[in-house]
Amino acid sequence: MHTINALKAQFRKLSHAHLPYHWFESLLLFVLNKDKAFLITHDDYLLTADEYDRLEGGMAKLCSGVPLAYVIGRQGFFGHEFVVNEHTLIPRPDTEMLVQAVLDVATDKDLGQARILDLGTGSGCIALSIAKALPSSAVLAVDYFHHALDVARRNAQDLQVLNCQFIQSNWYENIPAQSFDVIVSNPPYIARTDEHLAQLVAEPITALVADNHGLSDIEKIIKGSAAYLMPSGVLALEHGYDQGASVQELFAKAGFKDVRTVKDYGGNDRITMGVCDE
């Protein structure tokens, strides 16, 4: 008898200590296609054989180290649901601060019709969140991998975003000559020798790791930005918790002014931004 109540009790009893309970609950809701209230009001609901098989299969993946977002194929970000898969990085809460930083720039500069470039868009979570919040803006989202762009385009369709275009490009390589008010990116910034990398084996390594202590892609983006930023345009980048000073130095060397670093929810350096002085 696989009722919701029995499954809850079974989860707590068995050795799933390394799995958060909310992962089990989220997977169960996904399998049943119900909301959270259903688990409370229908705890005597008997799962069908197909539902139980899907739940069991999902639990096996979770126990093997597959992240919940990949098992259910979705991740919440900035108030929206995004499709994700093994070709895209899983959106993190701290990256929401990068989106908010761009929106604050648009507000401060009164950029209602801002032109915004998102480099390394992945699932499109940054570009599409900005596009939704600024419906009169024009957003260009870039990624090197077509599988990631397929996911981003699907998310644009699901979210009914019409003011975001997509281009396959290695950073600036295939971007037509034009100027943007804001360039934003969450590029790979983890060093290949970082001890925490082993915890992220399920996610695409190309979206995580960069050479030169994790700074090589950040440096490329900063150096190439002047050709694509309007005068007084803003560049905003996410980076590692211990890279704030190094990234500020790269901004300064490239001639940016008003360079500042924003801390994440944990109080760590996470986002550095500056104004193009050209």
Image (tube, rainbow, N blue to C red):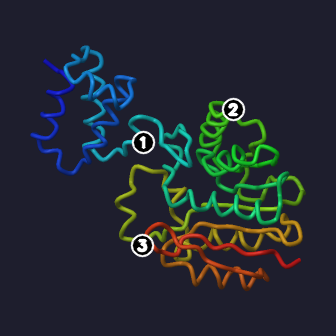
Seen from this angle, which residue lies furthest left?
13
Q: Quadrant of residue 254?
A: bottom right
Q: Earlier in the sequence, mark 2 or mark 1?
A: 1
Q: Vertically, is 53 above or below 143?
A: above
Quarter holding the C terminus is bottom right
Question: Which residue bears the numbered disc 1?
Answer: 69
Q: CA distance from mark 3 to mark 2?
A: 40 Å
User: Which mark lies nearer to you, 3 or 2?
Assistant: 2
Tell me if 169 is positioned left or right of 24 in this view.
right
As shown in the figure, which amino acid type bears the numbered disc 1? Answer: Ala
Tell me if 115 is positioned left or right of 262 in this view.
right
- Residue 237 locus on image (x, y percent): 64, 67
Question: Which residue bears the numbered disc 3?
Answer: 193
Q: Vertically, is 238 above or below 77?
A: below
- Residue 206 locus on image (x, y percent): 54, 56
Q: CA distance from mark 1 to mark 3?
A: 26 Å
